[in-house]
Amino acid sequence: MDLGLKGKTAIVSGGSKGLGRAIAEELALEGANVVIAARSNGPLDKAVAEIRAKGGEASGVIADMANEAAVNAAVAFATATYGAPAIAIANLDTPDARPGGSFSVGLEDATNADFRDAYETLVMSIVHLSRAVLPVMKERGWGRIVNIGSKSMKALHAPPTQKILSNVGRLGVVGLMKTLSFEYGKYGITANIAATGQFATDLARDAYAARGTTIEAFEEEVMKPTGLGVCRFGRPEEMAALVAFLCSTRASFVSGETITITGGMHKSIF
């Protein structure tokens, strides 16, 4: 199946590791010219080299994609390198989900600064990226914006993993992305969310190791006994396949959607 991505420029935030890394590679192997934006050189250089070794076209730029000036600079780099982005992947997480953060942050534990940081990271990062790429997308009459979100967008985190910062911030993202789909659909631009469940990334492995267990043990002890869905962690390439489709010419009638990808384990009806 030709996804119609050949020659299109894609910018992928958080693209040096995990799901972002898999998405960057998938888009590149489908023929897109990919710019990976990440915070540190080591993983970024490795990701670019590995994608190029497989025959894809990729470049990297150091950027904190929650910072407006850094976003504008990253988009300018992409434009100078390959041409203005036709595809923008927004892939940032809340502060409490980062290494060293808490897995159970409630109201009394979260400071005002935490809430502001979560809003800047989740919501404003997409605002900055959208403002940077949409003018040219409008001129061309084509564009794709995809947020890598969370299943909590449809069924909020609850005790014992409260994650109030994620609950509040991600619902703001849903409203933002839906509104973008309303406002820019007439220009051939779509805006969607791929709402992730449990995926076997390095970040997830580190998180389970901090709890004294492993992903494989969790699958055997918790997921399989439930009898729900596929009963395993997802593979990053499975998320990448969904995102590549959402970015494609084939998905021109899919917009404003929050699509959960959880292997059938998510209990929300919609």
Image (cartoon, grey):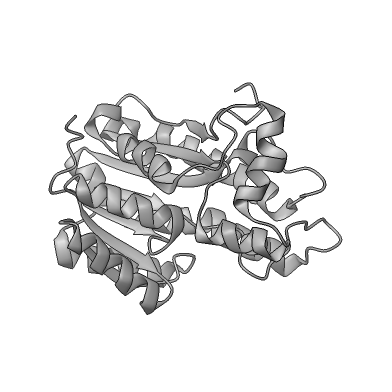
Please tell me which residue lies in front, 154 or 215. Answer: 215
Provide residue 48's location: percent of width, then percent of height. Answer: 27, 66
Please tell me which residue lies in front, 227 or 130. Answer: 227
Say above or below: 19 vs 120.
Answer: above
Position of residue 78 in the picture relative to residue 101 (left or right): left
Is residue 101 in sight in this rendering? yes
Residue furthest toward the bottom?
41
Query: In the image, what residue occupies the spot 25% across and 28% down?
Result: 250
Is residue 73 in sight in this rendering? no
Q: Quadrant where the N terminus lies?
A: top left
Provide residue 110's location: percent of width, then percent of height. Answer: 78, 63
Query: In the image, what residue occupies the spot 44% across and 52% down?
Result: 19
Say above or below: 135 vs 57.
Answer: above
Q: Quadrant of residue 165?
A: bottom right
Position of residue 74 in the picture relative to residue 208 (left or right): left
Say above or below: 252 vs 59.
Answer: above
Residue furthest toward the right?
108
Please tell me which residue lies in front, 153 or 185. Answer: 153
Provide residue 137's location: percent of width, then percent of height. Answer: 25, 45
Query: In the image, what residue occupies the spot 83% across and 56% down?
Result: 107
